[in-house]
Amino acid sequence: MFKPALAFVICICSSISFSQRDKFEQLYDEFATPNVYRNAAGAPGPQYYQQQANYIIQVTLDDAKQQVHGTETVTYINNSPDPLSYLWLQLDQNIQDPNSDRNLTETGDIESMASPYALSYTINSMNFDGGFKLMEITDVAGIKLPYTIVGTMMRIDLAKPLLNGDSFSFKIKWWYNINNRMEIGGRSGYEYFKEEDNYLYTIAQFFPRMCVYNDVEGWQNKQFLGSGEFTLPFGDYDVQITVPKDHIVAATGELQNPTKVLTKEQQERWKKALLSEEPVLIVTEDEARAAEKKKSTETQTWHFKATNVRDFAFASSRKFMWDAQVVKQSTKNVMAMSYYPKEGNPLWEKYSTRVVAQTLKTYSKHTFDYPYPVAISVHASSIGMEYPMICFNGGRPDADGTYNERTKYGMMSVIIHEVGHNYFPMIINSDERQWTWMDEGLNTFLQYLTEQEWQRDYPSRRGPAHLIVDYMNGTNTYQNPIMTNSEQIVQFGNNAYGKPATALNILRETILGRELFDFAFKTYAQRWMFKHPTPEDFFRTMEDASSIDLDWFWRGWFYTTDYVDISMNSVKWYRLDTHDPLVERQYEKTIYDDENKNISDTRNKQDIKRTENEKNPSLNDEYNTVDVFAVSEQDKKAYEKFLSELSEEDKKLLNEGYQFYQIDFQNKGGLVMPLILEFKFTDGTTELMRIPAEVWRYDNYNISKIFIFKKEVLSVSLDPFLETADCEVENNFWPRKAVPSRFDIFEEKNSWDGKW
Amino acid sequence: MNKTKLFLLVVILGSSFLSFGHNYFVSIASMEYDSASMKINTSLKVTAHDFEHMLEMKFNLRIHIETVSDSSEIGQYMQTYLKENFILSSGGIQAEMNYLGKEVTLRDELFFYFSFSNIRNPRTVQIKNQLLFTHFAQQQNIVNYKYGDRTKSVTLVSATPEAEIKID
């Protein structure tokens, strides 16, 4: 129980201390100025442009030497207003070179060499002859072109500048050694299966690719150091992949020659799959097991075409089985497919393709219908890596075919996540080299929504506010703001995935509400579909489409490492002074009676039988005989006078029984957030109040606010639904309540259960 | 030179290549001083997969931590590993770690529960947390220490595995 602090009139202490509006300052200084390419609403401007790069590629996978050999003809179209005197290409395969900047700038002390695993990893990487071996760079007529290699990039100098609207074609011939992913890591590479001497290849970054040239960066000029992934222009691909005849190939795009590479039976199964909303096996486990027992010396060429994609990747192995189902959308049917070795079963045949289908459904609902013909999940041990229409995903049962629950959810989550990357950044083509959060954060957010639609109470790792709390908590100086370049983020997972995903979820659940958020998010997705958005385009669109200024939110969540800790420091109860002496004197007496009394006073009442003036009342005068709580004639007159001066409205107000509560809030963590308050009343009812974050706009750190009810408050809790990522919850209750820590709960449980 | 063998190499473990899943390499210790028992109660969250990797390298077995009991050989090793790699001192005296138990969640989180006793001065503690540093070059160990209503945080990395937390 808490008691009224004062029986006296309302004191409205609005807390205008001094100007501390910095957390609500607009982001004009941080944001790029809107222009003809990107407008102030966050949409592409009237002169928005983007470049195009089309590729014709012939590539051969050498299974005996684990090499890729390729030739490509690149046609680059300059849609920019600027004349280009040189072209830049990405040679991202070059990070596998032992002398790459990625390797040279890697830091670590000797401790990190202590395990045999780390040691062999290091030695193997050091001795691996990785990186592109460029054989020939010519124009289409076969004339050599001058070029310069700078780390993971290459400049080709043009004889004359490429003007707006013009295109330039050139040819490159190259090869490289494929890395053993299991020994030295890598987004692509191979896994070797020793028992049967077989390889499973997941091949990407396998050809020199055009850099992006745009209105924000000019030519992309950031070397690949291993974390900031790719930034690539859209284009059309025509790719012929030559592999051992017994291999099955999965790739970006549509297969052009199924009659050449599939058996009649497999073609029939494919036709069946086109109509089936359940997965249909096109290559069966028996066929895959038969294939992996012998090695064909012949080769065969798989031909794929893909339109309007930013990249191309493929997987190849004689170990693959393959299943597919159709996903029907109003604009287009899509084939959801999976390729996996027997080692992936029983998990993969049961879940992979179905999870791909669910991903397309949830993501499309929040963005646009999936525009590509296929969405593929390939099983590759230990990783998760995304490319247009195809991704490589881990999640492998034990050798005996059993799997634990964590493996199952890990596998499903990675598939949702990597398939989800088709939307961010493959179609909504943000610059990954600059801003990891723009694809990983947005994608992790939709991953969470997908997981929850797949299974109720799915154990999602990121998204809900309370899951980020232990990371954001405290005075940690070793954190980056979300708006940090991809190559220098510490705590990649929490910072580029978890925190932005949580921020979006908070925007959706708490700041904007689901309807407003979903509309704005979808607007962003549709505006930037098949285009190159920047962070400002996202921030501005979310505000423009919701009519809510979110600069304070972006500033706090994306530009600082502040955290949320809002404390309810005190609750004070006031009521109106009725001036009625009968009421007020009685009230004062109640207060007096309720107060704690000094122990000597109490004991003296017992021990001192009679005081001197009690023995001899003549010693009294009017000072020590008056009842301080009695109502005098004077009091009554004063009250009558008071009443006579009140209007009828005033009198009514006085008798309504209003209760006033002043709550003092303190912002301890730095992030301003809405106040979500749940009041419980003595009559058993509750009331929820949602107060926008702008309540902090005059004072970012300390505010008081008055709440008026006609009933008495029993308790108040702040953030009762754990939606604001408040790091310290003990100060969210009034009266204060001890909140058991995870340790306390475990200790309690285990003092009875015993250990396991 | 106090080491007999040194492998002086430039190239260390590559970055995490995972767009998803294995991009944590972080542990978070939530520590709180309990004035009644004069202990620092700790729950330590680490990626279960990463910890399993360390154990798999040590024991050359596929390990699912859910099935490892505290009394088994691997379970005992885990406790020793914690005691050797997570050290709290105060006033020049190393506090005693009392292991309570562990828990694994479907979010791939492994929680260890332990408390420290014999703490000279709970307002100033030195914490050394080298958990998994020898296995993952990018491993970072965050420590949140709460004393009264104050929480202070430090992040420990391989190069600086130790820090002092002082509550003024």
Image (cartoon, grey):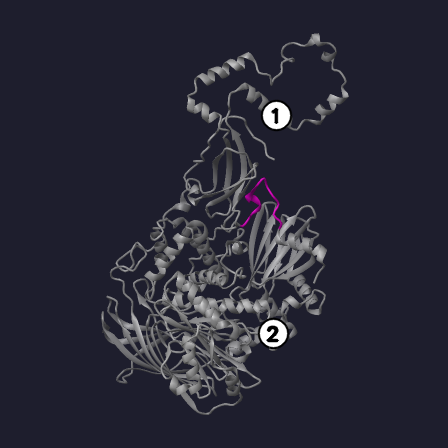
Q: Residues within 10 Å of mark 1 (few under 14, many from 20)?
A: few
| Chain at tag 2 | A
Magenta stretch encompasses residue B116: no
**Measured from the top left, where is residue A148 in percent x and y?**
34, 76
Q: Secondary structure at mark 1?
A: helix
Asked whether B123 or A429 is in front, the reply is: A429
Which residue does the image show at 72% across and 59% down from the upper left?
A: A754
Q: Is residue A729 magenta?
A: yes
On the question of residue A689 being in view, the answer is yes
Above or below residue B118? Residue B21 is below
Q: Position of residue A676 (x, y in %)?
A: 49, 45
Do the dots labelled 1 and 2 sit on one chain? yes
Q: Nearer the viewer, residue A366 or A306?
A: A366
* The furthest residue to the bottom: A297
Q: Position of residue A660 (x, y in %)?
A: 50, 32
A749 vs A437, nearest the viewer:
A749
Residue where numbered disc 1 is placed? A590
State the residue in front, A544 or A688.
A688
Q: Which mark is residue B6?
A: none
Q: Chain of mark 1?
A: A
Q: Is residue A81 left or right of residue A538?
A: left
Majority secondary structure in the magenta region:
loop
Q: Residue at x 40, y 46 (%)?
A: A24
* Residue A402, numbered label: 2
Q: Please, what secondary structure does the residue beneath circle 2 have?
A: loop
Image coords of residue A416 (percent x, y)? 47, 67
Distance Cα–Cα, label 1 vs label 2: 71 Å
**Residue B28 drawn above or below residue A323:** above
Disc 2 marks a residue whose amino acid type is: Thr
Q: Amino acid at mark 1?
A: Thr
Q: Is residue B120 left or right of residue B136?
A: right
Magenta residues, as a range?
Answer: A727-740
